[in-house]
Amino acid sequence: MVILSDDNEYKAVSAKKKNPVIKSEEIEYDKTYENTIRPKDFENYIGQSALKETLYITIEAAKKRNVPLDHMLFYGPPGLGKTTLAGVIAEQMGVNIKITSAPALERPRDIIGILMSLKAGEILFIDEIHRLNKVAEEILYSAMEDFMLDMTTGKTQTVKTMRIPLPKFTLIGATTKAGELSGPLRDRFGMIHRLEFYTPEELSQIIKRTAGILDIEITEEGAEEIARRSRGTPRIANRLVKRVGDFAVVKYDGVINEDIAKKSLEKMEIDEFGLDNTDRRLLKLIIEKYDGGPVGIETIAAALSEDVRTIEDISEPYLLQAGLLQRTQRGRKVSPEAYRHLGIKQYGVQQNLFED
Ligand code: ADE
């Protein structure tokens, strides 16, 4: 139930009902560069095959029964295609999608305006849903469960409550931190799916597809080289293919081959593991200043002059998955593999006496 502070606020909400003002950058889905390379259907959406199969069945069943899809939650590291997948689902359902993110839903009227603008069957996509404030979250409870907007207006003496019916819509939430979602919100999703990092083979296919759309010539080996250094993440792969493509055009004959991919990625200081300067600084800091760890994330962030959230969301997931970093009760620790990767000798480790 939403408590709106006074009648004026409710008037603002009513006005929104007629003409909801939703920040255009959040809902314009088809306009930016990223969207030209975003796959629009399952055939072009590479990877996540188990999830794709489940979704395909769910969508076809919903279409046959003529009911909206269950609310869905996608979680996993950034850049793995959560928004893209929501777009594919909308396309496959033949419905409109409205895209926003939790930080844009600061005031009650933001979420109310969007909910009231929805038509039956439409999809509402909320990115970074773990960052929703309490009020917005509570509005969503009844909206998701009963398709009702529960509102209370006026001050304590003159409180009026009302329930406004909403069309049956589907909420797709995306988060990099499923653990930070409250239990009641999590429980209102009918399906919860984790997106996995992509294999180099899948990334190579994505890179070739993107290069084709952007009119960039690329060899098989060139695509594989970029794929290996893309940290299992399509968003990074797509960014790199564009930058390496620029490099190939300016310095060479325009074709990305293995050699050009290697040279340009080295210039960008992206190593064979796909690690960039921040990742290497992070690992080196733990090794050199904290003897390999464990050390707390706040200490690491302060020493690197980085934001804790940036480290947790961007650097850490891949370092963990690549086995270079470990999370322990007492903080982050690097693995022996990290020492090897950085070419730093690990002291205090029992050497194998028979090794030459
Ligand atoms: N771009 C981002 N994610 C993608 C995917 N899974 N397949 C193809 N292109 C993508």
Image: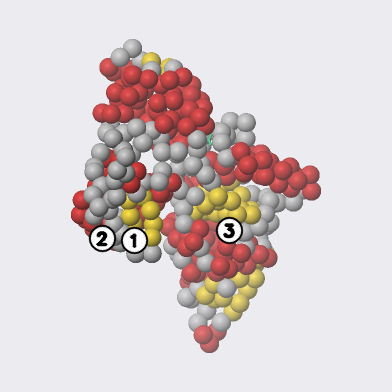
**What's the mark number on residue 299?**
2
Looking at the image, do the residues carrying marks 3 and 2 touch, with CB atoms under 8 Å apart?
Answer: no
Distance of mark 3 from mark 1, alpha carbons? 41 Å
Q: Residue at x 57, y 45 (%)?
A: 86
Q: Are marks 1 and 2 in contact (CB under 8 Å)?
A: yes
Residue bearing mark 1: 331
What's the distance in space between the residues labelled 1 and 2, CA to CA?
10 Å
| Among the two numbered marks 3 and 2 on one chain, the one whose residue lies closer to the N terminus | 3
Report the front residue among 164 and 125: 125
Judging depth in this view, the residue of 120 and 155 nearest the camera is: 120
The circle drawn on residue 115 is 3
Direction top: furthest residue: 253
Residue 30 vertical position relative to residue 334 in the rendered view, above or below: above
The amino acid beneath tag 2 is Thr
Q: Nearer the viewer, residue 118 or 179?
A: 179
User: Is residue 110 shown to the viewer in this render?
Assistant: no
Instruction: Name the amino acid type tagged 3.
Output: Leu
Work out how far the residue at label 3 is from the one at label 2, CA to CA, in angstroms: 41 Å
Is the residue indicated by label 2 positioned so its CB lies within 8 Å of ligand 1?
Answer: no
Taking 196 as reference, is 135 above or below it? below
Q: Secondary structure at mark 2?
A: helix
Q: Residues within 10 Å of mark 2 (few under 14, many from 20)?
A: few
Earlier-in-chain disc, 1 versus 2: 2
Residue 179 at x, y percent in the picture: 49, 61
